[in-house]
């Protein structure tokens, strides 16, 4: 019974978040990777905490309130950072789920350690750990992951928001360990507030995602159609490309034009597949997708950093766009 109470709640809520992902943005393999990363972090944190406490001047209470949260949140944050850097995360929804999965893996490993090494028949202890501590670990990492994605969506550097996000996670964790309010009441608040907050964010972000998909999808289709009909010169995009002829060679201008066309085509395909998946249809993988991705990479190399900077007013090569293209690569190789 203690085992179920200590481990089941956070796993059930992770499953609920996964089911709430109507756009199917979460990859099951990456989800398992996030959980495994959380488990590894818990084992590493345990080793660090035990060794550090041997030589520290602080007592257990001070250490658990101020030092352990810093180690633990830093380790979990690094897993989230790796997932983002590898383009495994693209939106607040999947950031929250992957972040929660990292925290869930951490909580399951930590609670398993306590179950094995600390014999107690007091079910209240395991209720507090299963509902309170586990949801705290998972919820805090989910919040950190969403804050990092928010930083990228605001066109800021990832590392610019990392310190602040980690600091917020640390203060929540440290505050939880202080037990400013009665532990049972604190656990009740955590088990109500964190799930409610995450579900609310998911619902709001899902609406924003739907609007973003629809608006950008049709804009890109319209621009792509003009390019293929030779009508681009009559648009603001065409006028801008004409101005660039004064600063780049003809060869680079041609590569820029091809880069824009292929990027738009791949972006439309990515959004189409996301909308198909959301409506329970299988995504359509184009037979020449791999060659298109390879060509886009070569064109990006040809135009160079200066060329990409010049094209930035036309196509925003931000993190979300790179993530969309990365999903195409993953779908093609699966």
Image (cartoon, rainbow, N blue to C red):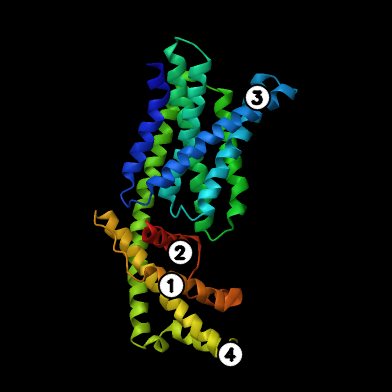
Residue 169: image quadrant is top right
Label 4 – label 2 distance at C-alpha? 28 Å
Badges 1 and 4: C-beta atoms under 8 Å apart?
Answer: no
Badges 3 and 2: C-beta atoms under 8 Å apart?
Answer: no
Residue 11 at x, y percent in the picture: 39, 32
- Rendered position, 81 above or below 263: above
- Of 271 and 212, which appears nearest the observer? 271
Secondary element under disc 1, as helix, strand or loop, is helix
Secondary element under disc 3, as helix, strand or loop, is helix
Q: Which residue is label 1 attached to? A: 263
Q: Which residue is label 3 attached to? A: 50
Residue drawn at point x = 54 percent, y = 87 percent? 251
Quadrant housing the N terminus: top left
Residue drawn at point x = 37 percent, y = 52 percent? 25
Q: Does the image show residue 97?
A: no
Circle 2 packing at 10 Å, graded few (<14), some (14-19), many (20+), is some
Label 1 – label 3 distance at C-alpha? 51 Å
Q: Does the image show residue 60?
A: yes
Q: Earlier in the sequence, mark 4 or mark 2?
A: 4
Badges 1 and 2: C-beta atoms under 8 Å apart?
Answer: yes
Which mark is drawn over residue 321? Answer: 2
């Amino acid at each position: 019974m203690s085992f179920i109470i200590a481990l089941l709640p956070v796993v059930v809520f992770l499953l609920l978040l996964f089911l709430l992902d109507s756009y199917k943005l979460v990859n099951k393999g990456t989800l398992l990777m996030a959980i495994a990363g959380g488990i590894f972090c818990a084992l590493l944190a345990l080793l660090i905490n035990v060794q550090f406490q041997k030589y520290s001047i602080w007592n257990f209470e001070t250490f658990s309130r101020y030092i352990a949260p810093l180690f633990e949140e830093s380790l979990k944050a690094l897993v989230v950072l790796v997932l983002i850097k590898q383009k495994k995360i693209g939106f607040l929804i999947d950031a929250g789920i992957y972040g929660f999965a990292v925290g869930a893996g951490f909580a399951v490993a930590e609670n398993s350690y306590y179950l094995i090494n600390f014999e107690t028949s007091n079910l209240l202890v395991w209720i507090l750990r299963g509902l309170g501590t586990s949801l705290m670990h998972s919820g805090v990492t989910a919040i950190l992951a969403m804050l990092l994605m928010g930083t990228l969506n605001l066109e800021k550097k990832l590392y610019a928001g990392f310190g602040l996000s980690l600091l917020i996670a640390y203060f929540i964790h440290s505050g939880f360990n202080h037990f400013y309010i009665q532990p049972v009441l604190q656990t009740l608040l955590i088990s109500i507030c964190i799930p409610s907050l995450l579900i609310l964010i998911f619902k709001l972000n899902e609406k924003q995602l739907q609007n973003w998909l629809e608006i950008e999808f049709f804009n890109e289709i319209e621009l792509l159609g003009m390019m293929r009909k030779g009508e681009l010169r009559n648009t603001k995009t065409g006028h801008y490309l004409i101005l660039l002829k004064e600063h780049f060679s003809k060869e680079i201008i041609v590569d820029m034009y091809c880069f824009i066309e292929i990027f738009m085509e791949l972006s439309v395909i990515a959004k189409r597949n996301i909308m198909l998946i959301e409506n329970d249809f299988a995504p359509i993988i184009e037979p020449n997708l791999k060659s298109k991705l390879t060509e886009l990479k070569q064109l990006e190399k040809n135009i160079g950093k200066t060329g990409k900077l010049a094209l930035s007013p036309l196509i925003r090569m931000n993190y979300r766009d790179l993530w969309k293209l990365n999903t195409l690569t993953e779908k093609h190789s699966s």
